[in-house]
Amino acid sequence: MAQQNSFDIVSQVDRAEINNALDQTMKEVRQRFDFKGSAAVVVLEEDELILTAEDETKLRNMNDILQQKLVRRSVPLKAFNYGRIEPAAGGTVRQHVAIQQGIPTDKAKEIVRFIKDSKAKVQASIQGDVVRVTGKDRDTLQDIIAKLKAKDFNINMQYTNYRSN
């Protein structure tokens, strides 16, 4: 029987690291002089962050602090989709930031098409929010991973579950 090797392309972020980055962000916001007496806050909902501040400048500054903390904790910024800044109650502004968990179907199709266009002897299939790539040669699979890392799909991707059967 022929040997089959495979790996999965996934998009996941560690929620514990996001929580830690939020805690550090709020601690810094409370201590900074430009935020004294401010009601600026970042809240983690189920699959999104909600940033609220008095004006757009404070919102942007708080977002910069948050991004620094996320990068320091190795949370990829590509996993966040920023919505537009909108007015909120009490003269404040709000911004919703969606956290991407799993590969969206349209991006998964784009990844599969890219792999098929590479003419490598591998098969790529979409399995829910994961793309599985299988092939006989390990070197070919590693070459596909290198090509995927070189191309920017504008999403956060990890390569997991590398198996040799």
Image: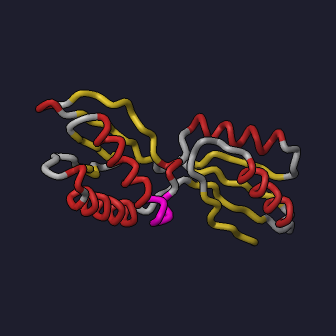
Which residues, given as a range, are shown in magenta? 70-75
Q: Residue at image x 83%, y 39%? A: 117
Give the side of residue 36 with respect to residue 59, left or right. left
Expressed as whole percent of the image width and height from the top left, the position of residue 79 reads 49, 49
Q: Residue at image x 31%, y 38%? A: 57
Q: How many marks?
A: 0
Give the side of residue 94 with respect to residue 156, left or right. left
* Residue closer to the observer: 77 or 117: 77
The image quadrant where one finds the N terminus is bottom right
Give the side of residue 69 with respect to residue 138, left or right. left
* Residue closer to the observer: 7 or 84: 84
Expressed as whole percent of the image width and height from the top left, the position of residue 88 reads 19, 31
Expressed as whole percent of the image width and height from the top left, the position of residue 12 reads 50, 56
Q: Residue at image x 36%, y 41%? A: 60
Quarter of image, res 155? top right
Quarter of image, res 161? bottom right
* Residue closer to the observer: 21 or 37: 37
Q: Residue at image x 30%, y 34%? A: 56
Give the side of residue 113 with respect to residue 20, left or right. right
The colour scheme used here is: secondary structure
Q: Is residue 84 above or below residue 119?
A: above
Q: Is residue 30 above or below residue 93?
A: below
For this orientation, the residue located farthest to the top is 87
* Residue closer to the observer: 2 or 121: 121
The image quadrant where one finds the C terminus is bottom right
Expressed as whole percent of the image width and height from the top left, the position of residue 123 reads 77, 50
In magenta segment, residue 105: no
